[in-house]
Image (spheres, rainbow, N blue to C red):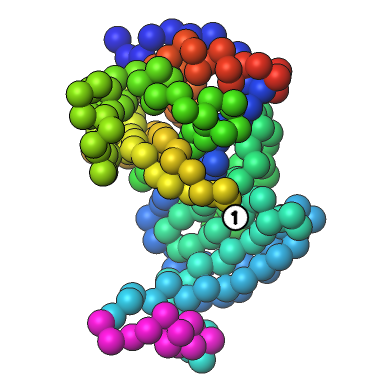
Amino acid sequence: MGFPKAEREIYGVNPLDEVICQLRFPPILRIDSETPAVFQERLRANYPFYQNVSCIPVMQGFSAGMIQKLGRDFPTLPNRNHEFASADRQWTLALTRESLTLSCKRYEQWAGFRDRLCEALNPLLEEYSPNFFVRLGLRYRNLIRRSRLGLEGTDWSELLEPWILGAYSSPDIKNEIEMNSLQMVIRLPENGARVLASCGVVRTGPPVEECYLIDADFFIGPPMESLTEPRHAVERLDSLNIQSHLFFRWCIRDSLHKVLLASGRVP
């Protein structure tokens, strides 16, 4: 049956810390062997910054500085990561021989993110013509900061559902817990779709405080019947976006939902 139906509503406080979309395809070696100048030119207005990072396996005995030096000294090493960033550094686009990844630090709503994705997907299809996508992923990192919501001192059990809290939902031991994390994989209605959810308390800032992370990676991937033709990619990502909304609403209690609705912005 999937997650319970829920209206897509307007949130005043956006709990999203980052949104990442990745489309993986069989290796296209031309992306490694030549500079993606035409691809960049199509996107340069919105992504003026560029860096070329070598994806070198980290081997025992090599420091991070040595890895970076190898990338500078040997620019023809395979498996390169072409990174393009927006002027405000809130949007990043990464192209490798096996994937296209779009990440956003200031997510507002799916329509805007979807437009950015299509803007990058079109030149990928026209320049490199991947046969199909082996995996589509849409990852939402929600970080609940009680200080932003005026909820300092409120127990997590009053804000989040017990199936997400794990041991924190127990009144007997919640004050004694030193570490608590929960991970699960849930099948979704879309053929071959699942969500990998990782949830738990983290300490982050500034200022440093105890927050609750709901990190949900919605994906369509193996088995083989889940290969996606390029013309269906955005449509299938639309379906994952719908599930992301239902999943988050399934995780939180009505009390937190009402607080998030307070100011009237679309999440």
Under circle 1, the secondary element is strand
The question of residue 230 being in magenta is answered with: no
Kindly identify the residue that appears in the image at 20 percent across and 24 percent down: 172
Magenta portion: prevailing SS class: helix
Q: Can residue 234 be seen by looking at this rendering? A: no
Question: Would you name the residue on which mark 1 appears?
Answer: 93
Residue 91 lies, with reference to residue 217, above or below; the image says: below
In this view, the residue in front, 51 or 24, is 51
Quadrant of residue 173 within the rendered picture = top left
Give x and y (percent) for residue 247. 41, 22
For image coordinates 49% across by 13% down, the residue present is: 255
Q: Is residue 93 left or right of residue 25?
A: right
Could you tell me which residue is drawn at 70 percent across and 19 percent down? 263
| Image coordinates for residue 25, horizontal then vertical, percent | 41, 51
Q: Nearer the viewer, residue 91 or 172?
A: 172
The C terminus: image quadrant:
top right
Give, as a single range, the part of the protein colored magenta. Answer: 60-72
Which percent across, then down, holds residue 218? 39, 34
Q: How many numbered badges does the structure rendering display?
A: 1
Look at the image and say whether residue 67 sits in the magenta stretch. yes
Identify residue type, mark 1: Leu
Q: Quadrant of the N terminus?
A: top left
* Quadrant of res 113: top right
Residue sitting at 33 percent across and 76 percent down? 58
